[in-house]
């Protein structure tokens, strides 16, 4: 598999405080890659930076050969790099249908919007039932489904999810993760940030660990689940049994 | 006081309120979407009035027909002002944005006022159409054609805006940008273009208000600030989250002012409008027409 998303030597600051230090990582086409790490490690900053909402001080982000770091956020979305932001950030005063339609704003996505919407409704039947409802009147789980549905409307090649399980009931989390897996099976490359490290590592082909703005470890999901430091720091488990 | 006098007062309040509503909704649109306060909105009303006056006096064009020229003229001026001035402010965040927008647009009011004075002199102008005094007389209540026309055009403009914002793709993109500009960008919406379009739309609405002002009252380079203040009162009444609510709020203010002018004392006209304004702020601080 070839590298799809390539991040090289990114330094970024939030105000006067540097939050990312020389971060490099790659996501290959068709992979699910997770980014785990403690609060304040810079995970959200990195996601926002790839999506173009935040600009790096130095370093590059490429998708295939397109330099994303040089593009404004709306152009990055047109390239098929879609972020489901932390906290969902729906258009709360607008209907479910409006939210979905707006997700397909770029020309490429707009032409296919009826077909895509049928697929979204297939995955999330509740959204079809509630299409006239205002987004901010729905439950947290439904809102997360709408956030993912809105992202799907943009025809993502690379779907980034920032804390998709935050604040949701376990059953809903299960459902959301199944859908992420399903989308990946259909060819969408996934890059996700997750607090729930166990779930993320079980789902992901590979993962990176970000601590205090630096990549401090990487490996396959399975490797990291067996890694003693990861087990203690992120999974709250004893070291793996000695073979 | 007879019923006819009461109705007459009410009707004139309605007419005046329609102008308040149109003047306010342009300001509300810019405020709601761009999150900046354009103090120079009244100056756009004033300039719209001058374009209308100029077309009328140079070519004798009816002011209601000349809207077809005045609106595009102010739309283009709005584009120019956005590209040259407001584009630099709209990027700022939070308090910094609102403060800078007020400072810069206040500066712009002085520039535009002086420009108008230089171009059109400080003389008071107005448009007197041939049918200015005519109207319907229904049971002793006079409905002048010019006033009826302003209210009808105001309604058409507001309904058109409502349709545009809620039923078309670019309109929904404007509302989405107002709700969450980052989410809008993530959805592939070019928010700079949205801001430019929004400001030009606001200026177009000011053009309509300016034409109405010139037909019903009078015009001078200094009237801008009065209309900015009126529009501000109206959008706070409506609730700053409600763009289209500015129109009914404008009507309400117009009617309250007219009735208090007639029943209390003409010199208290505006005072009572402001008392209502303060009462609304106390009882319903989120505004009359804001959701939540």
Image (tube, coloured by chain):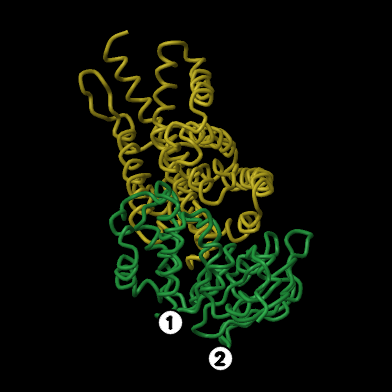
Chain colours: A green, B yellow
Is A202 placed above or below A125 here?
below
Q: Residue A9: give x, y in percent of width and height.
A: 73, 79
* Total count of labels: 2
Which sits in the foreground, B122 or A3?
A: A3
Q: Whole-percent x and y of residue B45?
A: 50, 43
Q: Quadrant of the C terminus of chain A?
A: bottom right
**The residue marked by circle 2 belongs to what chain?**
A
Q: Which mark is residue A162?
A: none
Q: Position of residue A142 (x, y in %)?
A: 40, 55
Q: Residue at x 69, y 73 (%)?
A: A228
Residue farthest toward the top in the current orientation of the protein: B1
Q: Residue at x 41, y 11 (%)?
A: B263
- The residue at which mark 1 appears reads as A187
Instruction: Spot the residue most to the bottom.
Output: A1
**Residue nearest the observer in this picture, B63 or A100:** A100
Residue B127 appears in view: no
Image mark 1: chain: A
Q: Is A113 placed above or below A131 here?
A: below
Marks 2 and 1, how far apart at CA: 14 Å
Residue at position x 69%, y 66% from top? Answer: A232
Kindly identify which residue carries mark 2.
A2
């Amino acid at each position: 598999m070839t590298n799809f998303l390539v991040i090289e030597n990114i330094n970024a600051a939030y105000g006067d405080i540097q939050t990312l230090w020389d971060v490099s990582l790659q996501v290959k086409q068709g992979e699910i890659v997770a980014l785990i790490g403690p609060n304040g490690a810079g995970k959200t900053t990195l996601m926002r930076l790839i999506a173009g909402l935040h600009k790096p001080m130095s370093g590059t982000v490429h998708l295939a050969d397109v330099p994303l770091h040089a593009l404004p956020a709306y152009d990055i979305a047109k390239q098929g790099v879609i972020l489901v932001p932390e906290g969902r950030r729906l258009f709360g005063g607008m209907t479910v249908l409006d939210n979905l339609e707006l997700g397909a704003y770029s020309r490429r996505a707009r032409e296919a919007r009826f077909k895509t919407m049928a697929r979204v409704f297939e995955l999330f039947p509740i959204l079809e039932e509630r299409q006239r409802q205002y987004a901010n009147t729905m439950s947290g789980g439904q809102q997360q489904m709408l956030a993912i549905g809105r992202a799907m409307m943009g025809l993502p090649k690379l779907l980034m999810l920032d804390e998709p399980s935050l604040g949701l009931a376990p059953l809903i989390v299960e459902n959301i993760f199944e859908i992420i897996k399903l989308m990946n099976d259909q060819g969408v490359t996934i890059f996700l940030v997750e607090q729930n490290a166990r779930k993320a590592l079980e789902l992901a082909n590979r993962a990176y660990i970000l601590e205090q703005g630096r990549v401090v470890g990487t490996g396959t999901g399975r490797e990291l689940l067996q890694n003693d430091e990861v087990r203690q720091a992120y999974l709250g488990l004893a070291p793996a049994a000695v073979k | 006081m007879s019923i006819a006098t009461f109705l007459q007062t009410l009707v004139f309040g309605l007419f005046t309120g329609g102008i308040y509503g149109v003047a306010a909704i342009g300001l509300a649109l810019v405020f709601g979407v761009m999150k900046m306060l354009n103090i120079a909105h009244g100056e756009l009303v004033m300039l719209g009035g001058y374009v209308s006056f100029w077309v009328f006096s140079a070519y004798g064009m009816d002011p209601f027909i000349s809207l077809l020229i005045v609106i595009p003229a102010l739309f283009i001026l709005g584009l120019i002002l956005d590209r040259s001035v407001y584009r630099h402010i709209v990027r700022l965040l939070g308090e910094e944005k609102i403060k800078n927008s007020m400072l810069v647009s206040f500066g712009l009011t002085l520039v535009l006022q002086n420009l108008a004075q230089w171009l059109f002199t400080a003389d008071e102008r107005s448009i007197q159409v041939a049918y200015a005094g005519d109207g319907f007389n229904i049971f002793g209540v006079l409905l002048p054609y010019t006033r009826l026309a302003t209210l009808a055009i105001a309604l058409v403009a507001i309904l058109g805006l409502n349709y545009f914002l809620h039923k078309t793709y670019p309109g929904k993109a404007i509302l989405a940008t107002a709700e969450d500009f980052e989410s809008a960008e993530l959805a592939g919406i070019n928010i700079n273009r949205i801001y430019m379009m929004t400001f030009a739309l606001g200026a177009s609405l000011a053009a309509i208000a300016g034409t109405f002002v010139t037909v019903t009252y009078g015009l001078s380079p200094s009237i801008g600030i009065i209309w900015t203040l009126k529009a501000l009162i109206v959008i706070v009444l409506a609730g700053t989250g409600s763009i289209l609510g500015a129109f009914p709020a404008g009507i309400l203010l117009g009617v309250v002012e007219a009735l208090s002018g007639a029943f209390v004392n003409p010199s208290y006209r505006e005072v009572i409008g402001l008392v209502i304004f303060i009462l609304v702020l106390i009882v319903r601080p989120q505004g009359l027409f804001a959701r939540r």
